[in-house]
């Protein structure tokens, strides 16, 4: 295929020149080599992104676990305070139980909010998804080359 180099026709691109001079076997070999490299790079990117997301999810889950333990202490100390209050003895012990329970309630709330925030920041593998969606564009000939 030859191109007339007039003012209306642009000179052939490097890819067009290679297509005109290289054998089909060479072009196919290059295509498969490039595709193999691209796939390896995408797999590596996916691994890195998923490891980062898993770490964030683990941190969030750990904080929610801490919130669960703190919530358990809320119930424990409220139960102790209620028990002491109903018993009518040692009013000071009942109030101290309530104070400790309130402290644990605050701790549980803070941990729950922090854990929820961390879990909301987990975003999976967005760069990998974006790159994979671009693969068909990269291997499809452009409209100009047809």
Image (cartoon, grey):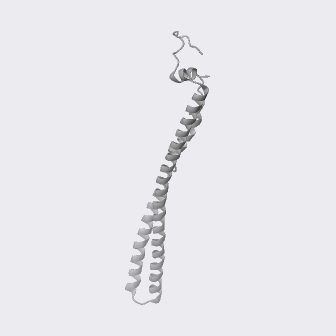
Residue 67 or residue 50, whichever sits in front: 50
Counting from the top left corner in percent of width and height, residue 94 is at 41, 83
Residue 8 or residue 37, whichever sits in front: 37
Q: Quick check: 114 above or below 4?
A: below
Q: Quadrant of the N terminus?
A: top right
Q: Residue at x 39, y 86 (%)?
A: 91
Residue 17 or residue 87, whichever sits in front: 17
Residue 137, quarter of the rendered image: top right
Q: Quadrant of the C terminus?
A: top right
Q: Quick check: 57 above or below 35?
A: below
Residue 114 in sight from this viewpoint: yes
Counting from the top left corner in percent of width and height, residue 109 is at 44, 66
How many tags in the picture?
Answer: 0
Counting from the top left corner in percent of width and height, residue 19 is at 57, 23
Residue 121 in sight from this viewpoint: no
Q: Residue at x 48, y 65 (%)?
A: 64
Q: Quick check: 53 above or below 28?
A: below
Query: Looking at the image, which residue sits at the far top?
Result: 6
Q: Is residue 94 left or right of residue 129?
A: left
């Amino acid at each position: 295929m030859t191109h007339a180099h007039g003012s209306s026709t642009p000179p052939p691109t490097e890819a067009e020149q290679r297509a005109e001079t290289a054998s089909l076997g060479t072009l196919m070999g290059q295509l498969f080599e490039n595709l193999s490299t691209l796939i390896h790079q995408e797999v590596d990117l996916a691994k890195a992104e998923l490891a980062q997301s898993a770490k964030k999810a683990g941190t969030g889950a750990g904080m929610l676990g801490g919130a669960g333990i703190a919530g358990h202490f809320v119930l424990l100390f409220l139960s102790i305070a209620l028990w002491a209050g109903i018993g009518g003895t040692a009013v000071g012990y009942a109030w101290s139980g309530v104070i400790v329970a309130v402290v644990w309630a605050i701790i549980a709330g803070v941990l729950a909010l922090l854990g929820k925030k961390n879990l909301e920041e987990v975003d999976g593998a967005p760069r990998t998804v974006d790159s994979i969606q671009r693969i068909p564009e990269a291997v499809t000939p452009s409209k100009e080359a047809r």
